[in-house]
Image: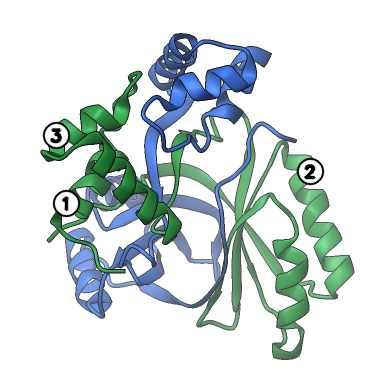
Chain colours: A blue, B green
Amino acid sequence: METMNSAEKKIARAIADIPLVPSPFAEIAASCGLTGAGILQTSRELLQKGIMRRFGAVLHHSKAGFTKNALVVWSVQPSQTEKAGKIFASFSFISHCYERKPAFQNKYNLFTMLHTKDDNIAVIIDFLAEAINNRNFLILESLEEYKKTSPEYFND
Amino acid sequence: MIMDEIDKKLLNILQKEFPLTEYPFAVVAEQCGIGEEEVLIRVGRLKKEGIIRRIGAVFDGAKLGRAGTLCAARVPEDKIGDFVRIINAEKGVTHNYRRRNEYNVWFTVNMATSDKLDEFLEHVKEKTGVTDILDMRAVKTYKIDASMEMVS
């Protein structure tokens, strides 16, 4: 586990949602008593350490046109999860892929989140099933979005 | 909102190659062949329309020792409204969807520690009377990348 010092946490909070101005880091710096260069330096370090996964735009999928999402869960033999997980991870339309415990309904242990623009979900799932040679899956289609936000890691 | 080719290109660059430099939008402008001012206007519009939720850092919760889980709850139809309201009030709940299954409410929770996560789920069960809530923790992560490629 990585730890962050209080200066890094302060910066982390400040760069969660940068202002849309020509020099956003200098503007943030002014409001928290730092320098723009200092914020950029710390940001690059956090990226390099992998504490920050990426820096950039976070989209609202459905508003960006990816109106269909489905959670598809797969029943995969323990000896095959690693291979299947890596295959799934390589597809751009899969945003998340996890092995979870306990498995859903005591068998669906590999979880994939899919995003697409239209009604081609069935085609995509068919393609995935073929890729891992396993048709033992369950589609959990989303019917309504109740909440979608980013986690706050530095405020609790 | 209708997005043109420049908007799509902007979204791809802003998601995947945001330049961590003093004047990031000027760099992006050059890549798109438009002016910095136009970039700021377009990005401002994309954000106002809610297509861009935010531009900023995405942290790795697991690396920071945070506890996260995916829960699936079996909620009676007449209790869904209350259940969703109570769940959504917790800021550690980041995603919450109704799905087509007997387990009809699926949500993700992220807390500072595993104990706090357990406490929250106990609190939810007590407060809502919904006791059938599955807590399915990730034991292996193969991918987390919520960026989406915009294609024309």
User: How many neighbours does mark 2 have within 10 angstroms: few (below 14), some (14-19), or many (20 or more)?
Assistant: few
User: Visible in this render: residue A78?
Assistant: no
User: Visible in this render: residue B79?
Assistant: yes
User: How many neighbours does mark 3 have within 10 angstroms: few (below 14), some (14-19), or many (20 or more)?
Assistant: few
Chain name for mark 1: B
Residue A154 left/right relative to B1 = right
| Residue sitting nearer the eye, B65 or B138 | B65
Q: Do the residues marked 1 and 3 share a common chain?
A: yes
| Residue sitting nearer the eye, B115 or A49 | A49
- From mark 2 to mark 3, how far is it between C-alphas? 45 Å
Residue at disc 2, secondary structure: helix
Q: Residue at image x 61%, y 22%?
A: A31
Chain name for mark 2: B
- Report the residue marked by disc 2: B116
For the N terminus of chain B, which image quadrant? Answer: bottom left
- From mark 1 to mark 3, how far is it between C-alphas? 10 Å
**Number of dots carrying numbers:** 3
Q: Residue at image x 29%, y 53%?
A: B148
Residue at disc 3, secondary structure: helix
Q: Where is residue A156 in the image (x, y as percent from the top left)?
A: 75, 35
Residue A76 left/right relative to B60 = left
Q: Residue at image x 27%, y 48%?
A: B11
Q: Earlier in the sequence, mark 2 or mark 3?
A: 3
**In the figure, residue A61 lies in which quadrant?**
bottom left
Q: Which amino acid type is shown beneath numbered disc 2? A: Lys
Q: Which mark is residue B31?
A: 3
- Report the residue marked by disc 1: B6
Q: Position of residue B19 (x, y in %)?
A: 29, 26
**In the figure, residue A76 lies in which quadrant?**
bottom left
**In the figure, residue B33 lies in which quadrant?**
top left
- From mark 1 to mark 2, how far is it between C-alphas? 45 Å
Chain name for mark 3: B
